[in-house]
Image (spheres, coloured by chain):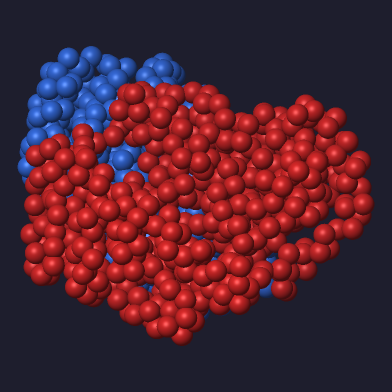
Chain colours: A blue, B red
Amino acid sequence: MIAPPDEAGVAEAVRAAHAAREPLAIEGRGTKRAMLRPVQAARTLSTRGLTGITLYRPTEMVISARAGTPIPEIEAALAEHNQQLIAEPPDTRALFGTEEPATLGGVVGANLSGPRRITWGAMRDHVLGIRAVNGTGEVFRSGGRVLKNVTGLDLCKLLTGAHGTLGVLTEITLKVLPRAESSGSLVLRVADIASGVRALSAALGTPYGVSGAALLPDGHGAMQGCLAIARIEDFAESVTYRLDRLRAELAAQGEAALLGREASEALWRDIRDAAPLNPAPEEAVWRLYLAPSRAPAACAALRQAFDARLLLDWGGGLIWVAGPATEAAHGAVMQAAAGGSFTLFRGPDALRAAVPVLPAEPLPLAAIGARVKSVLDPAGILNPGRLRA
Amino acid sequence: MISLPEPKPEILARRASILADLARLLPADAVIGEEIRLRPYETDGLSAYRQMPLAVVLPRTTQEVAEVLRYCHANEIRVVPRGAGTSLSGGALPLADAVVIGLMRMNRIREINFEDRYAVVEAGVTNIGITKAVEGEGFFYAPDPSSQLACMIGGNVMMNSGGAHCLKYGVTANNLLGVTFVTIEGEVVEIGGTHLDAAGYDWLGLITGSEGQLGLVTEVTVRILRGPEGARAMLAAFDSVEVAGQAVDAIIGAGVIPVALEFMDKPCIHACEAFAHAGYPLDAEAMLIIEVEGSQAEQDMLLGRIRDICAQFKPISMKLAESAEQSLAIWKGRKGAFGAVGRISPDYLCMDGTIPTGELPFVLKRIGEMSTQYGLGVANVFHAGDGNLHPLIMFDANDPESFRKAEAFGADILKLCVEVGGCLTGEHGVGVEKRDLMTVQFTARELDLQRDIKSAFDPGWLLNTAKVFPLEGNARITA
């Protein structure tokens, strides 16, 4: 493994690999090696040596850090000023069975967003600027450190979610927000997934600023049954008022309970990390992205196809699925995600190498994509095969 | 003045046959060739620049757009996309050898889904038209550029438009789910859809704000949001720019994110007050308009907190709206700011840089010095929460020297924005106006990378040629 201490070192390593036409596996701390397709590369280039927060202006709601900075370090720095990462990215340590925490570069490279995405946007929505090294070893920047910027083509968006295939992120600037003074949740016991999604749509259609809307079909801890959960994060007076209003307006949707701040925070950490899925080591995990009203039919189809364990977030717009790591199960996921999108989030190498881990692109886009790839990585050395065979 | 590339003589020579071809591809009323009917298209919101196009087409369907693009691609004819023509950066300025594709006839709302909270609309639907279509159910479309009565969603996507309320709700890019995209080859591709995230490369994010460089967008799926119970504004006036800036920092630092946080300097306050009689304090050096949302009690609570924070900075006056009407009165002056400046000066250039908010006092001081140096007045409006600064430079367009000075003044302001860590444009786009300043913000290699990404979509550089990227050093544009 090559783990340079700085950006210049990363650039040099990529330049050498480009000259030698030698593929590189790009990673931070390697916490997502079991995500998407396995990369065939003799050498690994890690950004773990690029650490540290380089700029933090709480009153400007902006933080910059080198790509290898562990997420907990960033969260701790933000917490000192009572701020937070807006998109609430999952802590994937339990899901991937890794000890090490994810890095900023990894979370941005994977565009990994958690529950707050439904109201406050995805990880990619908060990337204000990047520094990166392209596949020939050149350093380039896009965006900047201000909240509003439409100057030139937005390569931040292109690299966010590209899983290291278009460039090696070396430094990232994010918009952040204050943590809410308080929070709490309304938990509704609903008849089934369809009525749960309806309840969450109703909750998201209220003026109360619901900042999390999840469905736990198999209960959670002591709470039994199919649970629809709506979260409010706001000033203490507003949390009380808004939860009361929500409970009143959703009274017909199911038996209701309110969770105070501590219980609510613990529950949403579990939802964020998909902890209730608790997959066995040999099982696969998928994420499906659909319009919420399509979720009930998709869930029914998945349950019919295999022993699918489900967790719905984003009002039903995100379905986490755990099940057997078979091509048959994967085929059912692909079918259920028709009209939306999916990723094979975690699975054994054999399955990940054998199936499309995300949907195929329309032909004209695939052709443009190939040309864009050859602009940024002409020799095709960055994470070859990570997204598609 | 910014230069435009030499028109291709062979295209100009074939004008009659091109018009005849277009008339075969499209219904007769969708092709414009007569000079008198082309005239309205010669400029956009940056009216200092004018150029008659080769032809204008007004397609009604995605298929018609695709036909025109396929034809232009095959014949190497340049194309300029246009929505309502409200661009303040000359994004829709024609070229003499280009076909303007106007999307204003594509103005149908295709689908509204309250359960899944999205609307599918054609590119020519106005920004306000989306909100009008969903407000009966209490919903709205969040980005609200000041041109929202006229500007169209297709143009909003191409420029990644913002507005006064993006501090809370984000800009266009943050409120899109999908687009129907037409490539220069005339291929129609659905990008995104009705779901929140798509795996794979974020084409939607790259296309948003691409200023017509990559392809055309004919249909847009936007998120619609349930509106708040209510909203109310307050006004706080200070006797120095620095202190007003400190008050903004303190509000954000206390964890209060208002839905809007607007700053006006003294010249702007005076212009707006003379225009709108909103009751603005004329003795103030700086004034903040702060808006919060929620129930009546929540508005009271939030405005109370903000009032207490502002009070620590010895404001010379504060006014809390007690009703929706009083809120409107507070906003009235700000919303009319551009018109108000237009009233005291024959013409003005509206600049659009972004700066780190902490740099505001320094930047305003420097702008004041430049104003003296150039001998031109300037009024500043500022989205204080997100750092987007709109200096309005006053000049007289009938005096070429005055216009030249105004452009140089504007360029100096934008260079200053980049110097202090900001950028050339926060929401208006680069267009033709800021094209030659791109080298201030990007290195030659960075610009070349962006150009190469454009080439991946548009190898012949036919799409909105001569915008965004400096012509100098760009061998890809051939006359």
Image position of B48 with respect to B24: above or below: below
- Residue that appears at 47% across and 69% down: B393
Q: Quadrant of residue A59?
A: bottom left
Query: Can you give x and y, in whole percent of width and height, for residue B171 in the image?
Result: 41, 49
Q: Is residue B359 left or right of residue B194?
A: left
Q: Is residue A53 left or right of residue B461?
A: left
- Residue B41 seen: yes
Q: Quadrant of residue B265?
A: bottom left
- Which is more toward the observer, B416 or A268? B416
- Residue that appears at 16% across and 40% down: B323
Image position of B145 with respect to B187: above or below: below
Q: Quadrant of residue B290?
A: bottom left
- Residue that appears at 17% across and 50% down: A180
> How many labels sit on residues?
0
Query: Can you give x and y, in whole percent of width and height, for residue A116 in the image?
Result: 29, 43
Q: Is residue A44 left or right of residue A254?
A: right
- Which is more toward the observer, A193 or A86? A86
Query: Can you give x and y, in whole percent of width and height, for residue A337 in the image?
Result: 48, 28
Image position of A301 with respect to B235: above or below: above
- Residue that appears at 57% across and 30% down: B107
Quadrant that contains the C terminus of chain A: top right
Query: Can you give x and y, in whole percent of width and height, for residue B262 in the image?
Result: 29, 58
- Residue A262 seen: no
- Which is more toward the observer, A146 or B424? B424
Q: Is residue A238 left or right of residue B94?
A: left
- Which is more toward the observer, B409 or A263? B409
